[in-house]
Amino acid sequence: MGVDIQGKLRLALGSVKDHATIGKAIILHNHDGKGFSDIEIAVVRATGHDYGPIDDKYMHEILFLVTNSPGSISFLAERISRRLVKTRDRLVALKTLLLIHRLLRGGNRYFEQQLRNAHVSGHLQLSTRWFITNSDPSVCFLHKYAAYLEERMGWVINQAGKLEPVMSTFEEKSMDMVFRKLPRCQGFIDKVLKSSTFDFLPSDNLIQAAMINTLKESFQVYMAFSEGVAALVNMFFDLARPARSLACEILKRASTQSQELHHLYEKCKRFIENKNLEYPSVQIITVEHVLALEQCLGCTSTSSYWRPMSSKIGPTPSILNCLTRLTDKGGEKDEQKGDDSMPSTLFSCTLETKISKVWVVFEDEEFNKPGLFSGTVSDLPVHHQSTSGIVVNGGEITTTCNLNPFAT
């Protein structure tokens, strides 16, 4: 009973504050006549103290007023920032952040660019540091959502309607574009993973609305992330050694992120009440893939931040074991018989083994003559067992050993 009374008092006091702010804006409107005060009134009404979500009509009203009032975007940014800084109400702060997010997604390219410029210049602030972090999950989510929007400000909706990171002219013309875009995608995905919460999503409409917008954007960024990983793997064997080391670090991080993102989407399917969300199929980058690359190319690393997600993962598999798993067509059938919820790995559908019927020429003289050796690879001396090639006896292929699990 006490909680209900406290909630009613909060709503009553908040309503009084909102009416007072609107009254001041109306008085200013009568004095200046510029129409900027209408923008402030719309902001206050959109971010009221009630529990309801942001009404679309207020967002459309703000966009209409800004479009027809030149130079009003900086005023809008200042009023939104003032609303966020002055309030000590968690709901009002969350609604203000939601309004910023909706404006970024709903405005045209010029409006989006101007709003981003206002953030860079300091007119639009997203900080929630005055809310003391405690055990309240809603306050924790508020801080994480603000951090996500800080990252989101560095992204732009292109003409195709997809998110892409803001790049300088030099970066856009750079040859190592994959090394610039892929880490940006990974930073974005990290913010998505950190801002996710499932403590009371079914009962909080505002947090659900924020999560839905975040998920929609993460779907787009994941597609760019997946394309970047594929491009990195394709160019991996053509890179210089320092670039290979950097690529290994990126792929390690991608391995952990792909697993975490898969688990996040599976949870959201159960908790988020929105049937319009089209979840992508996350392709898992396994630990074996990255370790095979490291062993195959000598790309060793002592990075401490990368750890396998599962504690059940045993010792480092050999390269040949990785090759067997990646190229075994029967393994695909076994996977299909298992858990259908787990997606296929990123490279499992593109790898195949090709056998060439040419003679192998070894460095030692004793193996240069055809037909001299009729055994198997295990019968060879140790220094020949590691050689990649084919042993032929009478025109029949005895065995083959390919140490590159990603090459055809």
Image (tube, rainbow, N blue to C red):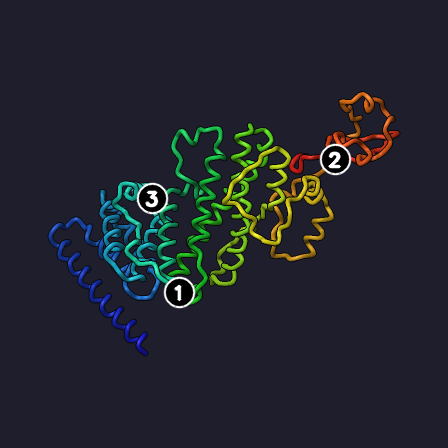
Give the residue drawn at x 44%, y 59%: 197
Q: CA distance from mark 2 to mark 3?
A: 55 Å
The amino acid marked with disc number 2 is: Cys
Q: Which residue in the structure is indicated by mark 2? A: 401
Asked if the residue at tag 3 contacts the one at tag 2, i.e. Cβ–Cβ closer than 8 Å, the answer is: no
Asked if the residue at tag 2 contacts the one at tag 1, i.e. Cβ–Cβ closer than 8 Å, the answer is: no
Q: Quadrant of residue 401?
A: top right
- Which of discs 1 and 3 lies nearer the camera? The answer is 1
Q: Quadrant of the N terminus?
A: bottom left
Secondary structure beneath dot 3 equals helix
Q: Which residue in the structure is indicated by mark 1? A: 204
Q: Which residue in the structure is indicated by mark 3? A: 112
Neighbor class of circle 2 (other Cα within 10 Å; few <14, some 14-19, many 20+) is some
Residue 299 in the image: above or below residue 341: above
Tag 2 or tag 1, which sits nearer the N-term? 1
Q: Where residue 207 appears, x then y in whole percent?
A: 39, 60
Tag 3 or tag 2, which sits nearer the N-term? 3
- Say which of 77 and 254 sits in front: 254
